[in-house]
Amino acid sequence: MRKHLSWLKRSVAVVASAMIIASMSAAVHAAEVKVAVAANFTEPVKEIGALFEKATGHTPVFSFGPTGGFYNQITQGAPFEVFLAADDTTPAKAIKEGHGIVGTSYTYATGKLVLFSKTGGLTLGEQTLKDGKFEKLAIANPKTAPYGTAAVETMQKLGVYDALKSKIVEGNNIAQTFQFVDTGNAEVGFVAYSQVALKPGGSRWVVPANLHNEIAQDAVLLKTGANNEAAKAFLAFLKGPEARKIIEKYGYGFAK
């Protein structure tokens, strides 16, 4: 009996030691990754980040804002390690100018542009823009935010940009643009579909893809993250089935 108890105690001690070592090992290998995220992708990446941390132990630290603004920060030495842009040209530029790593960029989602109003029951569409029966139209800054660029392209394609120019109010990014519309400070606005995909109420018109250039949103590993396994793991996780399911839930598509 005493031998059995002695053996049992030793076994428990061994198991406990193994668990402690495993825990310490996980803590040693767990790391932090700093990710610059285009504002339109805020809610999806928060959900993805939670799953990523649970699956890997790595901690993603997100910053949200306009793609152009982030790139300016990156060129000035901002410590971001992964860049999730709202276009495909900025990550390509990052690689060309020596801030991104060749072979790491890919399209993680394709976005949709929506004309949105907080007021329900409206029939929004091309005619809404042609009639111009509103005081303010919100768009993201087209110089720094790709969704703002797509909004301008849409109005130009429809031949209404010059007529509506005086009614346009610009948000610094697509998040601020949505706030303008959601608070009623602008009757209508061009926002990202992801911002209204799960939002009840209001009125919306999904802008046909032929009215603007494709909103291909690319990710890239920055040189600051070249030696960070957490950064590489995050980009890999973003390609996986769990992340893709969340991306689809918010109305994004994928490159063909």
Image (cartoon, helix red, strand yellow):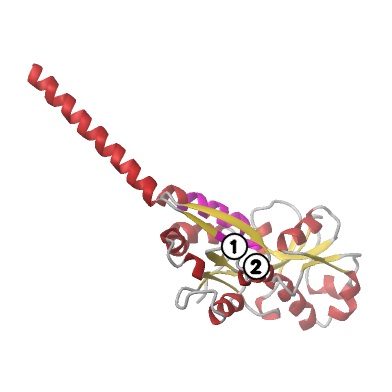
| Disc 2 to disc 1, C-alpha distance | 10 Å
Q: Which mark is residue 74?
A: none
**Residue 121 visible, this orientation:** no
Left or right position of 80 against 54: right
Residue 128 found in image quarter: bottom right
- Badge 1 is on which residue? 36
Magenta segment main secondary structure: helix
Let me know if residue 135 is in the magenta part: no
Region rendered in magenta = 35-52
- Contact, CB < 8 Å: mark 2 with mark 1? yes
Whichever of labels 2 and 1 marks the residue nearer the N terminus, that label is 1
Q: Position of residue 58 (x, y in %)?
A: 45, 52
Residue 39 found in image quarter: bottom right
Quarter holding the N terminus is top left
Q: Which mark is residue 73?
A: 2
Residue at the (46%, 50%) spot, across then down: 53
Q: Position of residue 57 (x, y in %)?
A: 42, 49
Let me know if residue 40 is in the magenta part: yes
Observer-nearest of 88 and 109: 88
Left or right position of 148 against 34: right
Bin the neighbour count of mark 1 within 10 Å (Cα to Cα): few under 14, some 14-19, many 20 and up: many
